[in-house]
Amino acid sequence: MSITGFDLSFRNLYRFEFPTQFRRKTCNCTAIRSSLSSTSSSSTAVSDSRNADENHVPTSYGRRMMISMIAFLLPLHGSIQSSGANANATDDLLLLQGEIRKVLSKGKAAGVLRLVFHDAGTYEMDEDTGGMNGSISLELDRPENKGLKKSLKILVEAKKIVDETQPVSMADMIAVAGAEAVSLCGGPKIPVQLGRLDSMVPDPEGRLPEETLDALGLKQSFQRKGFSTQELVALSGAHTLGSKGFGNPVIFDNAYYKVLLEKPWLSSAGMTSMVGLPSDRALIEDDECLRWISKYAGDQDLFFEDFKNAYIKLVNSGAKWRRRNS
Ligand code: HEM
């Protein structure tokens, strides 16, 4: 039943309140409350103007009504509670997105997206260690994380503001910021769940794939993190952003795959020989990767859909979650 439906039934019970043990302990149902109070006050105003006595129900009838409505409303209260939790989650996400957008620009998008991989990419399934846990802030001096300090710094600024209203983990900040970076540059809108906990210790070293790996090495590295070859190819499309020469550095599109198919590095002409990392070039030499590269080069919607799903998987890799409503 809709919240409005609940409100109309609720109004008939006028001063009835749920027993304390059924009330949500830490309810912060701002959206639900404002929705309830706005519909409630408007509907009350309408009936009040007609006849104030119409709202008066004789006590015995009122009691009978109340008892029968309790049975009806208690299960409903459960669903209102979960709507309340969803409303909280939506409020929290909007808060994060709002503060991130204030500090993010297209020029900073590539660095922020790279930050996501460098936080989450330490995950290894066998040991179930590493992953999306904000520990990148403790690992910035590692050589593979060179250049990421400035990207993290803007998120630390945004986090301070968010924390004043609703404490948030660094892992959630990074996960949402990466999604915002993608959509700011024209890529897919990616829904990111909140509730990750931060690790207080750095993740084990040597988990991120090196750029000198061949396709087999890259596949194996991603496999250890739970990712298929298709997901490796989809996620590598993130290199369409930034300075590696795949199309416009601030536009998230499928140029990465189109350029890979052209193999511009084979040309001796000027800057084209500089395009791509060795790991990007390695992908196209592998038949299985090539099949996905060709698909994504010919179908940007497919790339967006697969990137979105692989991104969601990446930002949930190894994440430890806070208990609901805590
Ligand atoms: C497949 C294995 C990968 C390797 C070996 C790799 C390695 C690298 C390297 C060496 C750079 C250049 C950094 C610099 O300019 O100093 C880079 C840039 C970048 N990487 Fe990756 N990466 C990989 C996968 C990913 C994934 C999965 C993502 C995100 C989902 C990602 C996002 C980025 C972005 C956005 C940049 C551009 C950063 C900028 O220009 O500021 N990378 N990567």
Image: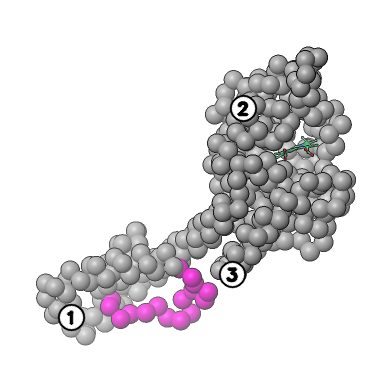
In the figure, is residue 171 to the left or right of 21? right
Q: Which residues are magenta?
A: 13-29
Residue picked out by circle 1 = 56
Q: Does residue 125 appear in the picture of this structure? A: no
N-terminal-most mark, 1 or 2: 1
Which amino acid does the dot numbered 2 rest on? Asn
Mark 3 or mark 2, whichever is nearer to me: 3
Which amino acid does the dot numbered 3 rest on? Glu
Residue picked out by circle 2 = 254
Q: Are marks 3 and 2 in contact (CB under 8 Å)?
A: no
Residue 2 against residue 73 in the figure, above or below:
above
Query: Which quadrant of the rendered structure holds the C terminus?
Result: bottom right
Query: In front: 285, or 85?
Result: 285
Residue visible at 62% across and 59% down in the picture: 158
Residue picked out by circle 3 = 164
In the figure, is residue 97 to the left or right of 246? left
Between the C-alphas of marks 3 and 2, the distance is 39 Å
- Per the image, is 318 magenta? no
- Per the image, is 24 magenta? yes
N-terminal-most mark, 3 or 2: 3
Between the C-alphas of marks 1 and 2, the distance is 65 Å
Residue 86 against residue 49 in the figure, above or below:
above
